[in-house]
Amino acid sequence: MTNTEKMLNKTVAIIKKYYDHSEKHPVLKYTSPDTFKKNIKLNIAKKGMGIDELFNEIEKIALNSPKTNSKWFFNLLVGGEILPAVMAEMLTAVLNNTMHTYKSAGIHILIEQEVIKFLLKKVGYKKGDGIFGPGGSLTNMIALVLARNEKSSSIKKSGIRGEKLVGYTSDQAHYSTEKFISVTGLGKDAIRIIPTDEKWKMNIKKLEENIISDKKKGYIPFYINATAWTTVLGAFDPIEKIAKIAKKHKIRLHVDAALGGWALLSNKHKNLLKGIELSDSVSRSLHKMMNVPLLSAVLLTKNPNILYKNFNENADYLFQMDEKDLNPGNKSIQCGRRNDAFKVWTALKYLWESGYEKRINNEFINAKYATSIIKKDKNLTLVLEPECINVCFQVKWKSASKICEALDKQGRIKVGYGKRKWKEFIRLMTVNADMTKKDIDNFFKQVKNVKI
Ligand SMILES: Cc1ncc(COP(=O)(O)O)c(C=O)c1O
């Protein structure tokens, strides 16, 4: 047997063991960093390991990794998996094509184009363009840069020369807008944090008041970030109404649909994003609710030329062959770029829209079921009627953070907590489409019985 065959066999054996182990041990007991340091040969020594020893270590690592594919994983925003997409991701590593040119990625450029075309159609942009990038946060950043450059034609070349640009996002939006406004060179003071209403959506009255007041003071509003599914509470900002304000004041509207964009594949739930086609750009993290492996995120733009216009450089040592559309490196902020589209294409080919729709609808059904349990139980209090699949609740007289920590340490389930002002609450997310009512029942049993 060649070494390649031996390693392939060992890899397949580890994957099989991992899936078997996940079935039997959906959540691992907490292991301290010190225990890992003792039990796994983490240090990079002068001498390498042989294949057998190395794969023994790899197996231990795999079986001791948090199991995000488990049905008892109710934490954060990845969960579940679509197996053919996992296989496509493994193949992607084997093929190792960088996505800047057709010369280096060939057929994968066409696959990426096809996925972007599909996603644009779902948003409702008639033409448009898109670029895959490293995560929802960074695609939000690209949207900020585009908006900044579009507002002032000299910024791309000469930098900021005193333009007083200001942007707007809600107090429930993801932190990436606040974080990356400083990367655009505008500084954190250039973002206005708009309060949310009683449903924890952006308060559009306050948004317009801020815009008018800024204009009076000589500021130039350039960017509104609306969120489709806020990270903690799962609220959808009223995109259609925000779009009207954006149009009236000539401001670019970006929709952070890192999470919520998945609902566009469900006829029953796509209304949550009503008006998204009126925006100028949209970011999506497909590695979250579309259940493909990390990373897979994309920025979609209504204007089909804006990415090329802003990020094209004359790298004649790189872009030597083929027309510009076949060389997406010239519309990206990256040079070498991972192939994050192949797994999405594979998942869509496998499930198609109807399969995804079924999964999405099931996630909503599970969230509804969880909500009904909370409403019936006098020891549980619902924080907010869920708009999607974030079910936020409190356990009477018990600290949410302590419950979540105890559940994790005791290896029961993985779930996180959120806070708003003085309120701390458990945030159950029915992120795994394969979950059943039995898993939800188990969730509440564990939450209620855990010793803190
Ligand atoms: C609303 C929202 N936008 C953006 C992001 C960032 O996405 P990523 O983790 O892909 O960088 C998140 C992450 O949870 C999010 O909840």
Image (cartoon, grey):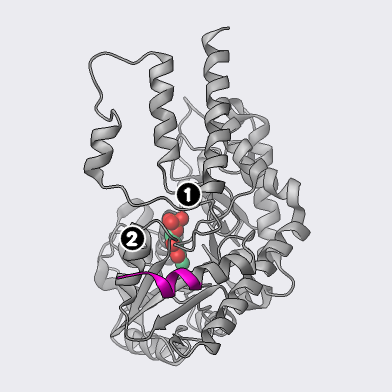
Q: Marks 1 and 2: which is nearer the front?
A: 1
Q: Amino acid at mark 1?
A: Lys
Rendered image: mark on residue 180:
2
168 over 182 or under it: above or below: below
Left or right of 144? Residue 406 is left
- Tell me the quarter of the image containing the N terminus: top right
User: Residue 168 in the image: x percent, y percent?
Assistant: 39, 76
Asked whether, in this view, residue 424 is left or right of residue 266, the answer is left
Classify the position of ligand 1 by quadrant: top left, top right, bottom left or bottom right.
bottom left
Which badge, 1 or 2, comes first in the chain's sequence?
A: 1
Q: Which residues are magenta?
A: 444-452
Q: Going 44% across and 45% down the picture, which residue do you hit? A: 333
Residue 360 in the image: above or below residue 3:
below
Q: Residue 388 lies in magenta, yes or no? A: no
Residue furthest toward the top?
1
Residue drawn at point x = 53 percent, y = 26 percent? 11
Residue under label 1, please give it: 67
Around disc 2, counting alpha carbons within 10 Å, would you say few (fewer than 14), some (14 to 19), or many (20 or more)? Answer: many
Q: How many marks?
A: 2
Does residue 430 sit above or below 93 in this rendering?
Answer: below
- Determine the secondary structure under disc 1: loop
